[in-house]
Structure formats: structure tokens, C-alpha cells
Image (cartoon, rainbow, N blue to C red):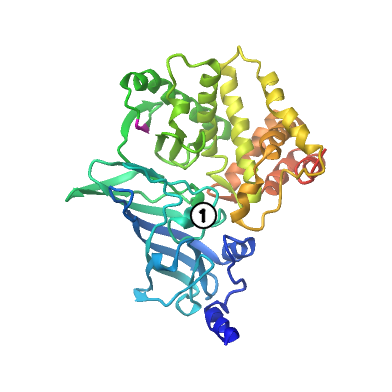
Amino acid sequence: MIRLAMTLLLMPLVAMAVVPGRGVPEALASERAANIRALRYELSFRLPEGKGEAVRGVETVRFTVRSSQAVVLDFEQKRESIVSVQADGKGVSFEFVNGHLVVPASVIRAGENAVRIEFVAGNESLNRNDDFLYTLFVPARAHYAFPCFDQPSLKAKYSLTLDVPAGWQATANGAETGRATAGGRSAVRFAETEPLSTYLFAFAAGKFQVETAVRNGRTFRMFHRETDAAKVARNREAIFDLHARSLAWLEEYTAIPYPWGKFDFVLIPSFQFGGMEHAGSILYNAGGLMLDQSATQGQLLGRASVIAHETAHMWFGDLVTMRWFNDVWMKEVMANFMAAKIVNPSFPEINHELRFLLSHYPAAYEVDRTTGSNPIRQQLGNLDEAGALYGPIIYDKAPIVMRQLETIVGESAFREGMREYLKKYSFGNATWLELVGILEAQKPGKVARWSRAWVELRGR
């Protein structure tokens, strides 16, 4: 009887090569990436005024597939959180297995498909507060909020509508295109984005103040909750200037105009990180940008660095994204590398070389010379385990290695290689080895061998 029950449960999955396990296994991600194209999400969320009330959502997922087979979306909630599923306007009898919504092959055809899902969003990645919220989906937490293909290699265009309490401000990756207010609620619509990985899709809404400034013909918007008007006035111009300078430097270095249209950033009290590089809508820890009048030189450098770092991600990580999170170190080390180039000349009184040496070399040596060390580029079998990749090897050895790489290739050739890499893989995905191939062409016989020793093997 048990065997029969399991057989009946898995019948909708027989058209699949992979039965989904917990999290986002690499095998499932690879199968989906090979079969799914032209992905679009049309999303709508109703955000209640009180954080105790559920966030409800509706989405239409549009995609093409090469062959008719069951389609697996990730949704790490209870089955009861899925209100309904429709395909071509008709109700679908779906399966829910290990945190995955399985749409049967019988309603999926080769070519274009549209699946409409009503759901109750999970709170785990919505960061709800009394009068504001913000999403944080890195590394693979979008599927806690809505059903999706939660892997970096399936980039999608996103259309978003937020139904919010009247008086709330809202920002997302796309530009606001309309707002209709009635009955104490506002429906805020956002333009469709360029292709984004799920961990970069984002929105924030709530009682924010909005500051606007124009630099070099571009409008920047800062959302914040700071109540000290003098503190805002003291920091405002510097914050906008630092963003504008970073953006201008990166446009010149990459030879690619800023790729995301509008430029918003949100200052979040007690944000989990220094910043998060959501395309067109960066999040920051408010305390790192709104500095006191007695701010130290280290705090000023830290503010400039985090702004340059997150702005660099608009190209390195957002425009071109790692195919799988085993290469997450790439975007981080590149953003730090570019940020240092942008910021360090503005602080000539600091010995940046000594600071770099003391910040990275002791910690890197301490770990890399032990038997428990690991390569910079590691294996990752499931996105649920992505957090295990972080540590001194990524944060301390990788920055040293990136400096080595520029020295081996030469500053000019390195820059040309980076430009080629960004142009070739724009709005797509790339691996470390694909970048190595581009730079190897600049210096034949050097880069691939160096990468093998310093990036792909442990210890040195």
C-alpha cells in the first residue's frame, strides 16, 4: 500500500528527469536552465498596514519550454499557502513536493506557456516592520515569498504592482509608472525590468521620506526614515555625490552606460548587511551612510567604499551574474576591487597598501595553510547550502588573488578583458572559467594555469 501511494504521488513527475529534493538542488537547476526560456513574472502583492496580517499575492509566470514536461517552481511554504493554480485560464491539479509546486506535463506544451498562481507570501524574506518592509532574497530566498524558479541562471523580466496603504512610499527595480489611490489604499505600478536573477528582484514600501537630487543629468532618489533633519541635511549632498562619482567612474571604466534606468537607494535602520545591490533599488544600512558630525576618517572611507561597492555591482553581479552560487565570490571580489580603485585616490592620507595587507594577508594565510582549507571556487550541490561558502577564503584570499590577476594580465589588458566579459554576457550569466578564457586570450599560457593553482585548488 505504501509503495502504491508513493507511485500515485510521483505520477505527475514521471515526465521529469529530476524529482525535486529540498531547497534548489543543482540537478534541478540545470534541468530547468536547459529547458526554460523567455521567462517573465507579472507579480502583484497586497501589503497590509499591520505586520500581523498576511501578505497576499497573484502572479502570472510566462515562459517557453523546449519540450512538454512537468514544470517545477520553488515555494518554501505550506501547501495551503497556494490558493489556486491556473494554466490557460483553467484550474490545474498540481503536486506539492519538498517545497516545490509541480505543474503537470499535461498542461505544459512545447512553446509558450502562462501559469497563474494565487498565494499567501511567506514572511521569512519580507522583513516586515510596523510601518515598512523590504525584501531580501539573497542567496535563494525569493521562493519563501512567491513561487518562482529560484536560481541565478534563470533570469527573468519582472512586472510589479504593489497595493499599499495610502501614504506609503514604494520602490522596486523598475521605475514607478502609475499610482491610483482609493479607499485608503494605493496601487503602485512599476515598469517591467531588464532580465534579473531572482535574488536581485526587490521592493521596499512604507513610511519613508524621499530625497531627490540630479547629478550629471541623472535623477537619484534616497528613501530614508531619519527624523533628525539636521543629520539629513549634513549627509545628503555627500551621499548623492558619492553615488554619482562612482557611477560615472564605472561607466567610463566599463564603457557600458548604467544599465538599469532609474537609480534609487533605500536606507534601512539596522539592515542586515552594509548594503545589497538590488538593480535600480540598492538597500543600505542607514547607520553607514547617515554619519554623525564627528564621523571619523574610517567612517567616511567606509561610507564611500560601500557606496562604490554596491554601485559596482550594477555591472559586476547584476548586469552579468554568476550562473551558479559556487561563483558568488566573483561578484564580491570584483565589487571590492572596483570600489578600491574608485575611492582610494580620494583619501591620499591613508596608506591603502598597508591597510590592504593587514586586513587580508594574516587571515588568508591563517586558513589557507591548514589542512581544512578549501579552494576559492568550491562545489555547491544545493542553494540551501550557499551560506557555507562564505569565510576567510572568499573575504581575504580572493581579494589578494584578484590583485595578482591584474598584475599578471596588465592593467590595460585586464580592463579590456573586463569590458569584453561584460559586453559578451550582458543581462545573462557567466562562470569564472568563461572570464578566465577571455583573459587567457590576452595573455596566452598564463591565466588558465594561474587560475588552476590559485582559485580552483586549495592552499598555496
Give the image quarter of residue 157.
Answer: bottom left
* Residue 89 picture location, percent across and down: 34, 73
Q: Residue at x 45, y 77 (%)?
A: 107
* Residue 267 picture location, percent across and down: 41, 33
| Residue corresponding to mark 1 | 155
* Residue 336 picture location, percent across and down: 61, 32
Magenta run includes residue 222: yes
Instruction: Categorize mark 1 by other alpha carbons within 10 Å: few (<14), some (14-19), many (20+).
Output: many
Along the line of sight, the residue nearer the viewer: 6 or 75: 6
Left or right of 18, for residue 228: left
Residue range (magenta): 221-225
Q: Residue at x 52, y 68 (%)?
A: 72
Along the line of sight, the residue nearer the viewer: 334 or 262: 334
Q: Residue at x 65, y 33 (%)?
A: 415
* Residue 230 picture location, percent across and down: 33, 18
Name above or below for residue 86 compared with residue 203.
below
Which corner quadrant holds the C terminus? top right
Name above or below for residue 117 compared with residue 363.
below
Q: Residue at x 52, y 74 (%)?
A: 70
Name above or below for residue 244 compared with residue 120.
above
- Residue at the outermost top position: 349
Counting the numbered discs, the total is 1
- Would residue 430 be seen by someone viewing this image from the given angle? no
Amino acid under label 1? Lys
- Secondary structure under badge 1? loop
- Would residue 79 be seen by someone viewing this image from the given angle? yes
Along the line of sight, the residue nearer the viewer: 375 or 159: 375
Left or right of 249, for residue 280: left
Magenta run includes residue 414: no
Dominant SS type (magenta): strand
Give the image quarter of residue 117.
Answer: bottom left
